[in-house]
Image (cartoon, grey):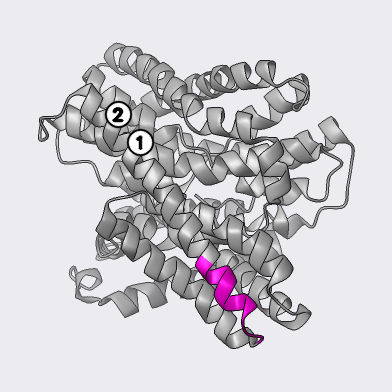
Amino acid sequence: MHDVGLSLGPFQVASIVVVLAAILGYLNHRFVRLPQTIGLTLLGALASLVAVVADAIIPGSFLAHAVRGLLERIDFETTLLEGLLSFLLFAGALHVDLAHVRLGRGPIAVLATLGVLASTGLVAAGFFLVAKLAGAPVPLAWCLVFGALISPTDPVAVMGLLSDQPAPPTLKATVAGESLFNDGVGIVLFTILVAFASGGADIGWSAGLRMFLVEAGGGVLLGLTLGYLAYLLMRSIDEYVTEVMISLAVVMGGYSIALALHVSGPVAMAVAGLIVGNYGVSHAMSDKTRTHLLSFWDLLDQILNAALFLLIGLEGIALLGEGRLVIVGLALIPISLAARAASVAGPVALWRRLLPPRSSMLLLTWGGLRGGISIALALTLPAGPSRPVILATTYVVVMFSVLVQGATVTRLIARLFGSAKTPPSSAAQASV
């Protein structure tokens, strides 16, 4: 009975996750009525707590062990970084207006690169001090690793809400564009810093910078190539099944090519989604094909989000009983928010004509949600004394971001830009 979770194959594990997401999603929609990703994260965390309590009060109960066994069967790194993330970024990019991205290309580029670097350094400094004061010291190199994994934001959810709000179009595009590209930048930076921290790679800062530029720049070029090729193929036919399969081929085949070429797959998928969404959807499809393709990707996006945030909630079972580490995580919440505010202040001040200063600062800071990508990166860290501290802190910051920031960002938008009708189920549909 103890090994029941370990005897499951990939299909059985996926089936369990989808069934749990459907059951908890129904309970949330029927009784709790929270936005879907928030509700699933909360119910997943509560399910972990119930499993632990049941083991404590019911003799012979192995619910907590079963949950841990299920999670151990899921390679979170492969599932998210090489699977879910490619689909989620492509789906999110389909709905971003490239004209507004061009107008806001300056702040988007700075936020997705220099903003991530600035946030990484500021969070690392705060993490170093807090961990030392809490009696769980972490070397500065690993503090930088934590800064890199927690700095990429996931405000695609806010973009979905902004589409129904009277917000400036450039601000909408800035929020969405940054979220699409800083994930890829953050992953590249994280990979380089882990190599430095672990001492497993003898590379200097100049080599690290070259690696960064090659991976990010190569991702952009690959995404442009794949997106334009898909556009040409879609323009030459009018058959919605084939065109949906072409879009799937771009994501699945394109991400595999990115891995083989050692360029950033997330950046490539974001760029390809922008091209297909702005040129393919607008100029290469009939109305029927457009409706089918967008509906397909919207549904896939919702299903993957449900599974992802359920898994984030369930991961909390690993932290129960680690009180000191949870305290470190709680202390990092205001530090990460302050670092986010500092990292967006420069671009907002520099492009104040494009980005209204007060509303842009508030929305970019509070709407800069952390999500599954941070959890996945933390879980890929090699074993060592710093890993439990980083993993626990990451989980606490992500849970606060999803449950508190995600639940209140709709009211913030209403106060900043006026009220608008927003379906409750669409609130805070964060991707990674």
Q: Which residue is mark 2?
A: 209
Compared across the picture, whether 270 is left or right of 135 comes to: right
Question: What's the magenta region?
Answer: 229-238
Which is the main secondary structure of the residues drawn in magenta?
A: helix
- Who is closer to the viewer here, 86 or 288? 288
Residue 88's place in the image compared with 267, above or below, is below
Which quadrant of the figure has residue 358?
A: top right
Dots 2, 1 in contact, CB < 8 A: yes
Whether residue 232 is in magenta: the answer is yes
The x and y percentages for residue 216 are 39, 42
- Who is closer to the viewer here, 21 or 159? 159
Q: Which residue is mark 1?
A: 213
Which quadrant of the figure has residue 253?
A: bottom left
The x and y percentages for residue 182 are 49, 39
Whether residue 256 is in magenta: the answer is no
Crowdedness near tag 2: few (<14), some (14–19) or many (≥20) residues, C-alpha within 10 Å: few
Residue 159's place in the image compared with 306, above or below, is above
Q: What amino acid is found at the position of numbered circle 2 in the picture?
A: Leu
Quarter of the image containing the N terminus?
A: bottom left
The x and y percentages for residue 109 are 55, 33
Residue drawn 51% across the image and 34% down it: 112
User: From where the camera sits, is residue 54 visible?
Assistant: no
Find numbered disc 2 in the image and state the secondary structure of the residue it sits on.
helix
- Who is closer to the viewer here, 60 or 210? 210
- Who is closer to the viewer here, 391 or 135? 391
Compared across the picture, whether 313 is left or right of 275 comes to: left
User: From where the camera sits, is residue 335 visible?
Assistant: yes
The x and y percentages for residue 327 are 39, 25
